[in-house]
């Protein structure tokens, strides 16, 4: 099977699919990835942080592949992306949800509001909470064991994969670049973006 690391940046959709089932480990907890979301930086994806070019914030998205891109939302939550593709051509896969397969007790302590174990990492911010990762993990390696988090290939194929619109973006929100393992209970709830209507000034 082709590794997501070896794919060109233009094939971030395939990279996202290949990441499903991989195991992400950090700070005593391992999560099996069950939902991801692809973002291209090649000028064709207005929802991508890299759409307008290199900035201090998105620089890590431009490579090399196999590093973690972490950003903060709403001033309090963190989201993690896996950088993919060739160096210089931004592409990343948002890690949206996963199943805690090791360190469940630790994960429960970090997410006491979770009513059941399937909700522990059922969302990008929740996933980061159970792994105890924050912005300090930005631009760190995932594949050689030297970073705060590490990615390992799946023990078995992910199974049937479904695709649908992305979540939490205001541009290109109907692009079907969100992928998840069919029937997995840890996949996050989908809420379609509703554009705000401008007031009618003709009345």
Image (cartoon, helix red, strand yellow):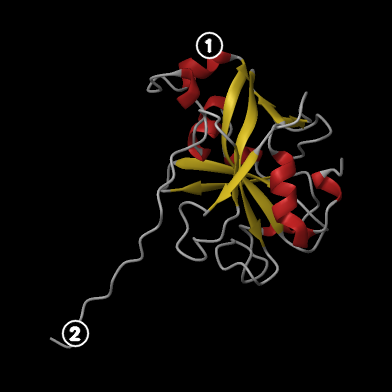
Give the Cα distance between marks 1 and 2.
Answer: 56 Å
Is any atom of residue 60 visible in this view?
no
Is any atom of residue 71 visible in this view?
yes
Circle 1: element type: helix
Query: How dense is the environment of label 2, judged by Cα within 10 Å: few (below 14), some, or many (20 and up)?
Result: few
What's the residue at 65%, 27% (across, down)? Answer: 32
Please give the label number shown on residue 56.
none
Q: Which residue is mark 1?
A: 105
Would residue 95 appear left or right of 6 to someone viewing this image? left
Place of residue 100 in the rendered image (x, y in percent of width and height, measured from the top left): 58, 21
Q: Is residue 11 positioned above or below 73 on the image?
A: below
* Count of marks, rendered view: 2
In the image, 165 versus 146, the foreground residue is 165
Would residue 47 appear left or right of 190 to someone viewing this image? right
Q: Which residue is mark 2?
A: 201
Farthest residue in the bottom direction? 202
Place of residue 132 in the rendered image (x, y in percent of width and height, measured from the top left): 56, 27
What's the residue at 81%, 52% (across, down)? Answer: 64
Q: Is residue 147 positioned above or below 190 on the image?
A: above
Farthest residue in the top direction? 105
Query: How dense is the environment of label 1, judged by Cα within 10 Å: few (below 14), some, or many (20 and up)?
Result: few
Mark 1 vs mark 2: in front:
2
Please identify the quarter of the rendering in which residue 103 is found. Answer: top right
Quadrant where the C terminus is found in the figure = bottom left
Circle 2: element type: loop
Q: Is residue 198 positioned above or below 22 on the image?
A: below
In the image, 144 versus 46, the foreground residue is 46
What's the residue at 68%, 52% (across, down)? Answer: 92
Place of residue 102 in the rendered image (x, y in percent of width and height, measured from the top left): 64, 15
What's the residue at 69%, 58% (across, down)? Answer: 59
């Amino acid at each position: 099977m082709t590794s997501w690391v070896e794919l060109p940046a233009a094939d971030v959709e395939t990279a996202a699919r290949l990441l499903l089932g991989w195991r992400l480990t950090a700070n005593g907890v391992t999560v099996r990835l069950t939902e991801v979301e692809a973002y291209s930086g090649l000028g064709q994806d207005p929802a991508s942080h890299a759409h307008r070019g290199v900035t201090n914030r998105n620089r890590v998205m431009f490579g090399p592949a196999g590093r973690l891109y972490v950003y903060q939302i709403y001033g309090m939550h963190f989201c993690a992306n896996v950088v993919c593709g060739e160096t210089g051509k931004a592409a990343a896969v948002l890690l949206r949800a996963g199943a805690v397969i090791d360190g469940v007790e630790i994960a429960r302590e970090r997410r006491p509001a979770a009513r059941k174990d399937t909700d522990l990492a059922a969302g990008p911010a929740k996933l980061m909470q159970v792994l105890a990762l924050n912005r300090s993990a930005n631009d760190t390696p995932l594949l050689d064991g030297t970073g705060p988090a590490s990615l390992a290939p799946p023990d078995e194929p992910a199974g049937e994969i479904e695709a649908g619109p992305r979540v939490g973006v205001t541009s290109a929100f109907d692009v079907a670049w969100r992928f998840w393992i069919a029937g997995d209970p840890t996949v996050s709830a989908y809420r379609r973006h509703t554009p705000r209507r401008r007031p009618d000034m003709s009345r």
